Amino acid sequence: MVVVVASVGAGALLQPFADVDARSNRDNRLAGTWRIEISPRNCQTGAPIPPFSFLVLFAQDGSLTKVVNAPAFQPGQRATGLGVSSHTSGNSYKTVSDAFILFDSPGFARGDNG
């Protein structure tokens, strides 16, 4: 198991490849492009895993687009992620996104959610 914590401006995202919670520094103003830096750790050993980043474009209509730059994926292996975000309260948001693995490699099978 891997713990993933990402800081986003004044807020944070957890578990970036599943349902996540995000916080904006302004009410109802998540729209825009956010660069997110991830510094994962192995839950069992506490050892750091190579950091990575991604860009997420949050549109005003609630749609989102995500591009991941993670060393776990080979170049071109992971498709662009697509999803939705919704305002939950105050400066909090919930997001759900999905992306496909385009070809096999150790740990990732073609067609899996990445």
Image (cartoon, grey):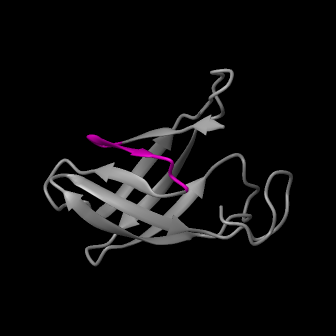
Can residue 25 be seen? Answer: yes
In the image, taking residue 5 as reference, residue 34 lies left or right, namely left
Residue 68: percent from left, percent from top:
57, 56
Q: Residue at x 25, y 60 (%)?
A: 30
Which of the image's four quarters has the N terminus? top right
**Residue range highlighted in magenta:** 8-17
In the image, taking residue 4 as reference, residue 113 lies left or right, namely right
Can residue 31 be seen? Answer: no
Q: Residue at x 33, y 51 (%)?
A: 22
Which of the image's four quarters has the C terminus? bottom right
Residue 113: percent from left, percent from top:
66, 65
Please tell me whether residue 22 is drawn above or below residue 79 in the rendered image: above
Q: Nearer the viewer, residue 46 or 6?
A: 46
User: As drawn, which residue projects farthest toward the bottom?
Assistant: 61
Q: Nearer the viewer, residue 69 or 1?
A: 1
Residue 66: percent from left, percent from top:
49, 64
Quarter-of-image position of residue 14? top left
Numbered label tally:
0
In the image, taking residue 92 as reference, residue 101 lies left or right, namely right
Q: Residue at x 85, y 63 (%)?
A: 104
Quarter-of-image position of residue 32? bottom left
Does the segment drawn in magenta span residue 73? no
Residue 17: percent from left, percent from top:
55, 56
Quarter-of-image position of residue 52? top right
Please tell me whether residue 81 is drawn above or below residue 9 in the rendered image: below
Q: Residue at x 72, y 67 (%)?
A: 112
